[in-house]
Amino acid sequence: MRRALAACLAGVVGLTPARPAAAQPADAATVAADSARVPAGLGVPSIAVSEVDGVTVVGANDLARLLGAARSWRADVRKLVLVSGDHRLTFTEGNPFVIADDRTFRLAHAAFSRAGELQISVDLARVLPDDSGWPRLAFDAHAGELRAAPADGYVGSPSVDVRAGTTQLWIPTDHPEQARVIGRGRARFRIRMRGAFAGTLPDSLPDDGLLRDLDVKSSPGGLTFELAVDPAATGWQFERAPNGDAVSLLLVHGVNALDPFAPEPPPGARSLRTVVLDPGHGGADNGVESDGVLEKTLTLDLARVLADELKRRTGARVTLTRTDDRDLGQLGRAELVNRPDPDLVISLHFGMSTDPRARGGAAWCAPAAVPAAVFDAPGLPTDRSGNAGLFELLPWRGAATSHAVVSRALAEDVSAALERQGFGPMSVHERLPMALLGVTAPGVLLECGTLSNAAERARLLAPNGLRVLATAIADGLIAWQRGE
Amino acid sequence: MRRRGLIALGLVLIALALFARQCFDRRHQLEPLPVVPDSAETSVRSATVWFASPEGDSLVPEPRDLPEQADLHARLAALVAALEQGPRGDGARTLPEGTSLLHAYLDETGLLTLDLSLAFRQGFQGGARVEELVVGSLVRTVSANVPEAKRIRIVCGGAAFSSLGGHFPLDRPLDPDDWP
């Protein structure tokens, strides 16, 4: 009787329980169905859920981040408004109702505050309709997360077909128009796609096909499929599937009509008759400076020592882009590099960091980018990489990209040699540096060490320091020459 | 007899409650709650800004709450300011001290021009690795939070320039896909 009276009073004065009611346990089938609304996968946006007094909730700040919404708290009426474009979601503390634009839905539990942050029941994923204008949500009890459908859709499981000497890779995607090839080296063929990966990779690839390896990685804004293509493949073609729900990569053998891979020389020893060394910076451009040591001076000193080392060990003709303290400018530098038609060019640099513990170096080489246009030109002579029949229209500044594969090998061989001599850690990056703009030979920009690191600086400035460094670089060049 | 008393007490309490609610409602009619518009000025949005890792060999994301701004310039200025202030957790600042956004312009093709203060060029110190991190943190932060920017051109003090430290070209628009 007293309980009935209390309930009656509460109803009359409009009181609502301050604490959320206990959650009803969801059955396994419901949970599975809910989580399947937004499949899990690489790159799918998600936030962790938590349990408070038996209620599964997410923090409003995390929810706003998941939905890509701005949030506004109205303290006077204890309301939180999430805004994304023209859509609004309104939650009220102590109230189970959520207002989505002009529609109202009831959650199983009232929103409540905890540590100054409104907590929203994951029931939101169930009540928010698909046509609300918000990303579709799904609560996955097993994973303990609330997921949102990725804005750029999904990428599905790749499949591989092999027939009549061709290999075709199919990748389902919601946005085939946003997929593109960003690297065309056989060893590192890369496809960039938008969306999240909700599929699985094949357990194995056909032995008689032209695809040797397939992997997928998450990258900001999407995914990158990384492929290793059989050296026997001679061309590729990337296009949208006719029905518009997938992209396909066709790999062929013995056909020259398709797009070419990045040129690569035949395996084995390479020519090393002419080498150009480019001491970085010069003139008014000092480069980095640490404890009175100027990069432009050190690179020139290193170039001289390295030139002697290379002449002595390889018999190669070695030229320097500068032999005194002057600024060559980008155009002048490229002209000096290209003039002797070198087998390789190394631009020598040193680094610096505000963190005195930073050490080691890095090498940059041109990426195996897709050229602006490719023309079939059977009359053209075979180039020294052994590629014939296709004429690639390359912008002048990106000429070095036609040597991307062999430049990558050079960067890796030199980096490995430096690490062996204790000049590491080293890393290799594919990005076209200024020093290689307009350069028509294989080359790398080599950052040989970190001048701000006291130990590295002392080692370089020791009586034999540059000689030891030059020996390590020469070791790398000779390994590259041997094709090791 | 006792039951009748309880019922009477209940009726009295109900009457009192109704009276109290009427008074409460009337008071609220007389003194309406101030209407506080949930204006853009009071909204915040979670953004992701990218700084150099503590080892200085990669970029690491850091979530930030920034004021919600409808104006493109204000949004980008807040992002540049967050980068210039540096990370709150582990990591290292990438933008030179004093760097700020002077102007921003987005054309119909999605080309975003960021005009940064001269401190961006004049305050830069470092080799190729640092230069790559500086440009990468800027491009990645802008593209992650301003998705309408399809390409990004960086100018300084209203003028184009060829390179920040002489290692990587900045004289052409940058494609965010090339700075993953």
Image: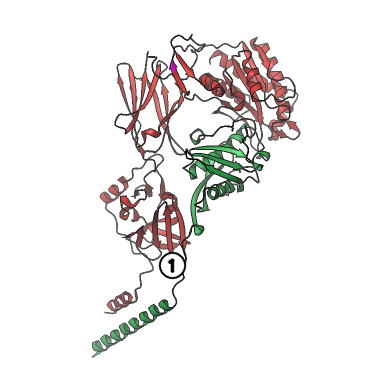
Q: Label 1: which residue?
A: A77
Residue A131 vertical position relative to residue A158 in the rendered view, above or below:
below
Residue A203, can we see it? no
Residue A280 is left or right of residue A20, and the answer is right
In the image, taking residue B3 as reference, residue B152 lies left or right, namely: right
Q: Which chain is green?
A: B
Classify residue A366 by image quadrant.
Answer: top right
* Quarter of the N terminus of chain A within the rendering: bottom left
Q: Position of residue B179 (x, y in %)?
A: 52, 35
- How many labels sit on residues? 1
Q: Is residue B71 above or below residue B128?
A: below
- Which residues are drawn in magenta? A375-387
> Is disc 1 placed on a helix, strand or loop?
loop
Is A272 left, or right, of A200 in this rendering?
Answer: right
Q: Which colour is chain A painted? A: red
Q: Residue furthest front?
A: B108
